[in-house]
Image (cartoon, rainbow, N blue to C red):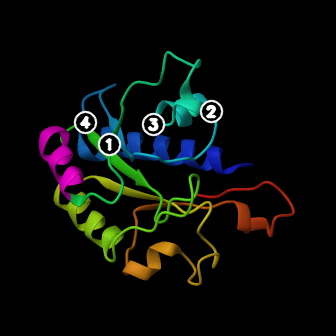
Amino acid sequence: MNTGVEGGETAIKLARRWGYEVKGIPENQAKVLFAENNFWGRTLAAVSSSTDPSAYSGYGPFMPGFATIPYNNLIALEEELIKNGETIAAFMVEPIQGEAGVVVPQEGYMSKAKEICEKYNVLLIADEVQTGLARCGTLLASDYDDCKPDIVVLGKALSGGILPVSAV
C-alpha cells in the first residue's frame, strides 16, 4: 500500500470480511464505527466517516455502513455496541487525534475501548498513521494504555518520510 488512507481502507475491508466470515454478520450488513473528528484521508470511504463539513461537503452520496460516536466517550461506545453490536464489525479510532490540533484522550481510553469491543465481539482498529512508530515516544501510541488493538494501521514514519508507504 502506498498511503495511510489505503491502509485505513484495507483495515475496513479486513474487518468487514472478519465480520461476515467469523462473527456471522449477515451479508452486506457489516458496519464500522468511527470516532467523531477523525481524519484518515480524502477517499470516499474516508470522507464518508468524517464529521468535518470541509472534508465531506460536495462528495455524496456516501459509503453505507459507517457511523460515528464522540471521541473519548466510552459510554457512547458501549451504548452504540449494545444497540447495534450484532452488525458492527469494528471500531476504528486514532489513539491521539491530530487533524484539528492534538487531542489526547483520557488515560486508559484505548485499553477500555478494547475491553468494550471484546465484550461485544467487535474488532478494535487503531489508526496509528500519525502516531505510530515511536512518533509519540513508544512504538505505538496505543502502548501508553497497554492496549493491543486487533488491527493497526501504520504509515508516514514507516519509510522515514522518504516514500509514501503504509501497512496493516
Report the residue marked by disc 1: 19
Q: Amino acid at mark 2?
A: Thr
- Choose the circle earlier in sequence order: 2 or 1: 1
Instruction: Report, in whole angstroms, how far the alpha carbon at label 4 lies from the one at label 3.
Output: 26 Å
Task: Give the residues in magenta.
Answer: 75-85
Look at 46% across and 25% down and name the residue there: 63
Query: Is residue 124 something that shows in the picture?
Result: yes
Is 28 covered by the magenta stretch? no
Helix, strand or loop under label 1: helix
Check the image and report above or below for 19 versus 151: above
Report the residue marked by disc 4: 25
Is 78 covered by the magenta stretch? yes
Query: Is residue 21 something that shows in the picture?
Result: no
Q: Residues within 10 Å of mark 4 (few under 14, many from 20)?
A: many
Report the residue marked by disc 3: 51
Report the residue marked by disc 2: 43
Q: Is the C-beta separation of discs 2 and 1 under 8 Å?
A: no
Q: Is the C-beta separation of discs 1 and 4 under 8 Å?
A: yes
Q: 87 or 100: which is nearer to us?
A: 100
Instruction: Report, in whole angstroms, how far the alpha carbon at label 1 lies from the one at label 4.
Output: 6 Å
- Choose the circle earlier in sequence order: 1 or 3: 1
Instruction: Report, in whole angstroms, how far the alpha carbon at label 2 lies from the one at label 3.
Output: 14 Å
- Choose the circle earlier in sequence order: 4 or 2: 4
Helix, strand or loop under label 2: loop
Q: Mark 1 or 3, which is nearer the eye?
A: 3
Q: 119 or 73: which is nearer to us?
A: 73
- Choose the circle earlier in sequence order: 1 or 4: 1
Q: 16 or 94: which is nearer to us?
A: 94
Q: Is the C-beta separation of discs 4 and 3 under 8 Å?
A: no
